Image (cartoon, rainbow, N blue to C red):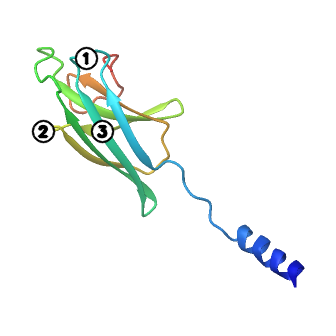
Amino acid sequence: MVLSLVSLVFLGLLAVKIALANEGTIQLAGKTEAAGRCFAASVYVDGGYRILMTCRDLKMAVDPVKHRYVVWVQMGATNLRLGEIVNGKLQSGSDEKFERLFVTLEEDSYPIEPSGDV
C-alpha cells in the first residue's frame, strides 16, 4: 500500500509542467537621485510575455536632440526594442525570454540599436 502510494506520487511529479521563471516585477532607477524611475511587470500569457511599465519623474527636455525614452529587452547578446514610453507608460510584449529590461534616451522612436544613454 505504501509502495503504491509513493509510486503514484512519483509519477504525479513527473507529469507536472515546468513553470516559466521569466514572470515578475522589475524596478528601474536612474543613476542619480534626479533621474526618473520605472516599475514594470512581466506576465507569461498565450505563448509570450506581456510587459506593462509605468514611469515617474522622467525629464522631458534632457537634450535638444535626444528626447525620447525607448525600452529594450536583452536576450543574450541581442537587444530588442519594445517601444517608446509615452506619457510615462508602455505596454508591449516579447515572444522570447529576456534577461534584462532597460531604458535609453534616443533621438528617434525607432532606433535599430540602443544608444549609450541608459
Q: Earlier in the sequence, mark 1 or mark 3?
A: 1
**Residue hosting label 3:** 39
* Identity, as a three-letter code, of the amino acid under mark 3: Phe
Circle 2 SS class: loop
Mark closer to the observer (1, 2): 1
Q: Residues within 10 Å of mark 1 (few under 14, many from 20)?
A: few
Q: Earlier in the sequence, mark 1 or mark 2?
A: 1
**Percent coordinates x, y for residue 66 in the rendering:** 18, 19
**Residue hosting label 1:** 33
61 left or right, relative to 18: left
8 left or right, relative to 54: right
Circle 1 SS class: loop
**Percent coordinates x, y for residue 23 in the rendering:** 46, 50
CB-based contact (under 8 Å), mark 1 and mark 3: no
**Residue hosting label 2:** 87
Q: Which residue shows up at 74% across the image and 68% down it? A: 14
* Identity, as a three-letter code, of the amino acid under mark 2: Asn
54 left or right, relative to 50: left
The residue nearer to you, when weighing 9 against 44, is 9
* Identity, as a three-letter code, of the amino acid under mark 1: Glu
Position above or below: 34 against 10: above
**Percent coordinates x, y for residue 83 in the rendering:** 27, 39
**Percent coordinates x, y for residue 86 in the rendering:** 16, 38
Q: Earlier in the sequence, mark 2 or mark 3?
A: 3
